């Protein structure tokens, strides 16, 4: 047999795991500094770890109560009805649920270029066409309603990323509001706030009350430090929130993930430390790196280094792993995650040496 025609489906190329790189270099994983996947360098919330340890013996049961509890906590946190909180396996899962709820075969989606690869992947899984709008280096990756509208042609889904990965740029809430008013009423704006906790800007959650075509996605993978568990969520308008029951994969957000996320939500100390640390470190990256960088609202900084593949390779040989942005369609740049103070200092020293 054959698969269907997957030739237009680009495979996802993740940043490589720490153990893999350690094996390749013949060093201990502990000797490497991983600044390539925007993970939380402070680890998971201790409360989340405790909650998982207490629940491990119960994983023979389906995650019904833990899913309901997490949904209720998030609804409370955001001041929304529980039905408007679409808990999912990672924010990637929420992107899929929104696609399932909106896309018919042949519909278009509009995604930023460069941008997060999964938007286009998810669209293709749902037999949609992928169009792009530019977020450009000459423009310092500025995002605005006009830039999106110039490319917009009635697509069913429009993705906005704020803060934007990999550049760190943000889109002002008023610009999102303008978009919500100017696009077709049947176009859903998805505001991906995977890095929202690190930003000083207000969440687009307020627009979820004002418009029935704005949804927000968030994740526990970054500021909450739970990337390995795969848990995120969407916040959707009340008028069609009940679609969740028809589109979600049953029990896809697992029991330990739901319990850990619920506990992490209550751990203000861990969250504060993660956010403050990332903000300090991203400024150290901007001040310390000798190459050109851009302001970032996230826990990472984009840097222009010339031959990015060579720089990433040379840094790796010196024990620092960064992300070559070639796979984002941004050759010449690397993305450096804000690590702990020590990791960031090491990253700056190594990168300055290898770009010298
Ligand atoms: C990390 C990230 C996500 C979410 O990842 P999950 O681990 O699936 O929650 C979503 N969008 C962007 C832009 C990201 O960088």
Image (spheres, rainbow, N blue to C red):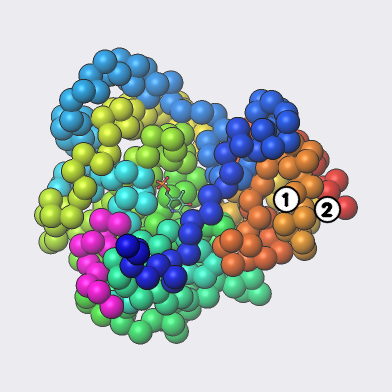
Residue reaching furthest front? Answer: 1
- Asked which secondary structure carries label 1, the reply is helix
Quarter residue 4 falls in: bottom left
What is the magenta segment's predominant secondary structure?
helix
Q: Is residue 207 visible?
A: no
The residue located at (45%, 84%) in the rendering is 150
Q: Is residue 75 visible?
A: yes
Q: Nearer the viewer, residue 100 or 80?
A: 100
Q: Which residue is mark 2?
A: 355
Residue 306 falls left or right of residue 120: right
**Mark in the foreground, 1 or 2:** 1
Residue reaching furthest right? Answer: 356
Q: Badge 2, how many Cα within 10 Å: few under 14, some, many 20+?
A: some
Q: Position of residue 156 (x, y in %)?
A: 28, 74
Q: Is residue 340 magenta?
A: no
Q: Is residue 103 magenta?
A: yes
Q: Position of residue 163 (x, y in %)?
A: 49, 56
The residue located at (78%, 41%) in the rendering is 317
Range shown magenta = 96-106
Q: Nearer the viewer, residue 113 or 194?
A: 113
Q: Which mark is residue 115?
A: none
Q: Which residue is mark 1?
A: 312
- Asked which secondary structure carries label 2, the reply is loop
Sequence-earlier tag: 1 or 2: 1
């Amino acid at each position: 047999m054959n698969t269907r025609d997957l030739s237009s489906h680009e495979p996802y190329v993740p940043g490589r795991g720490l153990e893999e790189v350690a094996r390749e270099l013949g060093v201990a994983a502990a000797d490497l500094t991983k600044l390539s996947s925007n993970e939380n360098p402070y680890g998971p919330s201790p409360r989340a770890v405790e909650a998982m340890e207490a629940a491990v013996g119960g994983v023979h049961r389906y995650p019904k109560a833990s899913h309901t509890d997490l949904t209720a906590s998030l609804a409370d946190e955001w001041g929304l009805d529980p039905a408007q909180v679409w808990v999912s396996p990672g924010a990637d899962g929420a992107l899929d649920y929104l696609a399932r709820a909106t896309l018919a075969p042949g519909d278009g989606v509009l995604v930023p270029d460069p941008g997060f690869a999964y938007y286009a992947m998810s669209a293709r899984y749902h037999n949609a066409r992928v169009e792009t709008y530019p977020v450009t280096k000459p423009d310092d990756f500025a995002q605005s309603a006009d830039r999106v509208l110039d490319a917009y042609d009635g697509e069913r889904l429009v993705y906005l990323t704020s803060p934007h990965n990999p550049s760190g740029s943000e889109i002002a809430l008023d610009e999102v509001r303008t978009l919500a008013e100017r696009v077709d009423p049947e176009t859903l704006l998805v505001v991906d706030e995977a890095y929202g906790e690190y930003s000083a800007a207000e969440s687009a959650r307020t627009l979820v009350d004002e418009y029935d075509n704005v949804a927000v996605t968030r994740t526990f993978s970054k500021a909450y430090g739970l990337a390995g568990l795969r848990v995120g969520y969407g916040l959707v308008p009340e008028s069609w929130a009940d679609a969740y029951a028809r589109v979600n994969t049953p029990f896809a957000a697992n029991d330990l993930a739901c319990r850990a996320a619920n506990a992490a939500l209550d751990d203000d100390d861990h969250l504060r430390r993660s956010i403050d640390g990332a903000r300090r470190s991203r400024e150290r990256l901007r001040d310390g790196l000798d190459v050109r960088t851009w302001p970032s609202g996230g826990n990472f900084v984009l840097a222009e280094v010339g031959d990015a593949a060579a720089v990433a390779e040379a840094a790796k040989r010196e024990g620092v792993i960064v992300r070559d942005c070639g796979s984002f369609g941004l050759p010449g740049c690397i993305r450096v995650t804000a690590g702990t103070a020590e990791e960031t200092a090491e990253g700056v020293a190594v990168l300055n040496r290898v770009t010298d």
